[in-house]
Image: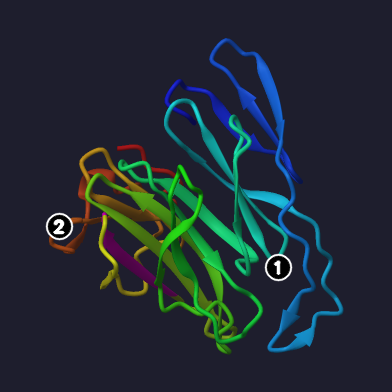
Amino acid sequence: MDGLGTIFEARGGLSVVATHTDGSLVTYDAPPAAAGEPTLDGGPLKTYVGGSSVRALAPGTNGEVFAFVSNGVNSLVVGLISRREGALLKYGVILDAATADTGQLEALAYDPSLSTNDIQLVTVDPVSLHVTQTIDTGVNPRVQDAHLQTHSLVITKAAVFVYIVTQSMPPAATQTSRLIKVPIGSPSGSLIPTGVTAGLEATAGADGRIYLYDGPARNQVFVVDSTTGSMAVDPDLTAPNGTFVRAVFV
């Protein structure tokens, strides 16, 4: 949703539909990312089926909305209103995107060409659409005994928070969550301990705190103090036993 209340939806492929507050619809067609041959550790991926699609959206200023397009080999950030483009070469996977109060675009991106690559937090300047900073999350989505389950990118006035949950392969099938805090303007982040049962989803409250819920958290909501990093269950947000919290609005 942009600052005027218009809702932007990626509906598959390169199409984005904007629904204005009066109910009128406008369709935008994003350009494709740069074509390329997918590889893994130097070898071709014979089973790969390519095709660019919009993977994430982030509101900008002055009515602009940015779409992140990827095709498994390269990505592209494009202003849907201005039609400005910025190439994100080698970042073949875009997991999420958001906008900081400074106007800087933040994206969770991944280069899938090497099995040793970690997920990166990529900062993009909204004017030049050039990458100004990358921070390694330390999370490799191709670790042998686990796979990427969920991921969230949430922003407060003070920091960017990356929340990634991986799940080990059966028969154990346990979740491990990582919450990474990157203060606005900082070149590095720090890990906030969350344990293994903090939940699958994350959202930032208007109070600046981070709320973790769903999955192994079940009927509980864990609240993280974004300043101190302390975490505790909020009894006022606890649902009845046997239920799951699926969304939090604070």
Residue at the spot 80% in from the left edge and 73% down from the top edge: 37
- 249 left or right, relative to 110: left
Q: Earlier in the sequence, mark 2 or mark 1?
A: 1
Q: Residue 104 location, x and y as percent?
A: 38, 47
Which residue carries the number 1 mark?
73
Residue at x 66%, y 79% (from the top left corner): 113
Query: Residue beneath label 2, please?
Result: 227
Q: Nearer the viewer, mark 2 or mark 1?
A: 1
Residue type at mark 1: give it. Val
Mark count: 2
In the drawing, does residue 155 fall left or right of residue 152? left
Mark 1 nearby-residue class (10 Å; few <14, some 14–19, many ≥20): many
**Quadrant, the C terminus:** top left
Residue 109 position in % (x across, y down): 53, 64
| Up/down of 81 relative to 101, above or below | above
Q: Is residue 179 magenta?
A: yes
Q: CA distance from mark 2 to mark 1?
A: 37 Å
Residue at the extreme front? 128
**Whether label 2 touches label 1, CB < 8 Å:** no
Left or right, 15 with respect to 173, comes to right
Q: Is residue 54 above or below residue 182?
A: above
Residue drawn 75% across and 54% down?
A: 52
Is label 2 in a helix, a strand or a loop?
Answer: loop
What are the residue bounds of the magenta stretch?
Answer: 176-184
Question: In the depicted view, which residue is nearer to us: 250 or 117?
Answer: 117
Front residue of this view, candidates 166 and 125: 125
Q: At which x and y percent is residue 184?
A: 26, 54
**Tag 2: amino acid:** Thr
